[in-house]
Image: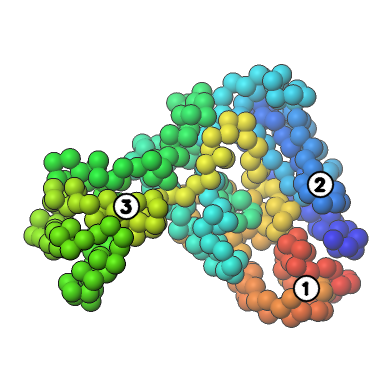
């Protein structure tokens, strides 16, 4: 990053922190804080092991330092400012889930990536409330300012959980270790949770398999290693049975070698349909009981967008490229490394390789992402 670009971003972040309200987490005095600042060269060297005794002290620090990234601990400590983790005195931690587009999609435009990750968040929220029994009041949803969302669960029942208990929740959400055929004792296939998801995935698979007729379906199954004529015929009969059509799971389908083959983790054709029904959270974030998480109302130094707490009911209409944008539409000259199209503040801008005049909000985004350098002045 060139000095002029660094100065531009530092000034704009400084303005934001001076002029805007900063939200503090519950139990602020029990949190460890960490910050990354502009001008630190390659890598993210974090200044951490900081503690604040009051909202005013924390606010004054952030406004005076204007960090590129601001974090606080999901854990609660008796002495959060202690120099080592062992001296801090861990007393509990919020349960945190992170859904990041890096784990979902590759090579798509930023706005399309954000739309895809929102779908995954809605799935996660439904599983947490409808299946795991967490109250919606205990959930706080936060747009990270970058490529995803965080869900904070502040429920007294989970504060003392160690990493293993948290991993069990992740395993359920992600279907890790799931044995699908074990869910259908007694031939029932219309239940909720993972029983319902497995049944729905199998119906989708059967519909696709039979789309071109039974003959084509049989040919396809015989092309799968280990599937012979007899087993293929029995499988097709089961998925075309009245019991299966009525929502049941025939016993001969549950025990079918074909079903076990297409459920194989080693390339089974049904596996992607099951994975699509999981909530693909980032396991290390949830299981780390001493994690630092982005501070809502801070700015993300990799995008210039605000970290925003989003009421659950407002998620469907939340647009990060409007609702998390804090900078203006005044024009700034930038030199872009390549041509791109970018929506922001309700408009779509085409930025060509080389010199462009773009809104300040877009200039901040492009410079933070390393796509452009400031080319000189603002109008």
Tell me which corner region of the image, top left, top right, bottom left or bottom right, holds residue 185: top left
What separation in Å lies between label 1 and label 2 (alpha carbons)?
24 Å
Q: Is residue 310 left or right of residue 271?
A: right
Sequence-wise, the earlier of marks 2 and 3 is 2
Helix, strand or loop under label 1? loop
Callout 1–callout 3 Cβ contact below 8 Å: no
Residue occupied by mark 3 = 263
Tell me the residue that label 1 is attached to. Answer: 337
| Nearer the camera: disc 2 or disc 3 | 3
Residue ID for mark 2: 37
Q: Quadrant of the C terminus?
A: bottom right
CB contact under 8 Å: marks 2 and 3: no
Provide residue 300's location: percent of width, then percent of height.
Answer: 70, 52
Q: Is residue 19 visible?
A: no
Distance Cα–Cα, label 2 vs label 3: 48 Å
Outermost residue, right side: 3
């Amino acid at each position: 990053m060139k000095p002029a670009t660094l100065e531009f971003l530092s000034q704009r972040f400084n303005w934001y922190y001076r002029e805007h309200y900063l939200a503090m987490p519950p139990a602020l005095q029990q949190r460890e804080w960490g910050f990354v600042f502009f001008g630190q060269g390659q890598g993210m060297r974090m200044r951490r092991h900081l503690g604040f005794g009051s909202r005013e002290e924390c606010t004054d620090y952030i406004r005076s330092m204007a960090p590129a990234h601001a974090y606080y601990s999901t854990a609660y400590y008796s002495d959060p400012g202690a120099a080592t983790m062992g001296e801090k005195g861990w007393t509990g931690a919020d349960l945190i889930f992170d859904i990041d587009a890096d784990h979902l999609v590759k090579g798509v435009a930023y706005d399309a990536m954000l739309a895809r990750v929102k779908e995954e968040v809605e799935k996660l929220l439904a599983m947490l409330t409808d299946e795991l029994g967490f109250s919606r009041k205990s959930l706080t949803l936060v747009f990270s300012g970058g490529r995803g969302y965080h869900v904070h669960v502040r429920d007294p029942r989970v504060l003392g959980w160690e990493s293993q208990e948290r991993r069990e929740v992740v395993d359920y959400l992600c279907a890790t270790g799931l044995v699908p055929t074990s869910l259908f004792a007694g031939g029932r296939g219309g239940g909720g949770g993972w029983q319902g998801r497995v049944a729905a995935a199998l119906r989708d698979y059967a519909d696709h398999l039979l789309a071109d007729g039974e003959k084509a379906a049989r040919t396809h199954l015989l092309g799968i290693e280990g599937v012979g004529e007899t087993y293929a015929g029995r499988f097709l009969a089961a998925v075309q049975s009245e019991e299966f059509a009525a929502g049941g799971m025939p016993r001969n389908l549950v025990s079918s070698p074909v079903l076990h083959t297409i459920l194989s983790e080693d390339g089974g054709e049904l596996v992607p349909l099951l994975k699509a029904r999981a909530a693909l959270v980032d396991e290390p974030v949830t299981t780390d009981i001493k994690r630092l998480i982005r501070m809502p109302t801070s700015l993300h130094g990799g995008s210039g967008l605000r970290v925003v707490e989003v009421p659950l009911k407002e998620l469907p209409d939340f647009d990060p490229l409007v609702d998390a944008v804090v900078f203006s539409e005044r024009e700034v000259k930038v030199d872009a490394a390549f041509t791109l199209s970018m929506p922001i503040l309700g408009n779509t801008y085409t930025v060509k390789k080389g010199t462009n005049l773009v809104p300040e909000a877009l200039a901040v985004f492009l410079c933070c992402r390393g796509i452009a350098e400031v080319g000189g002045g603002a109008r």
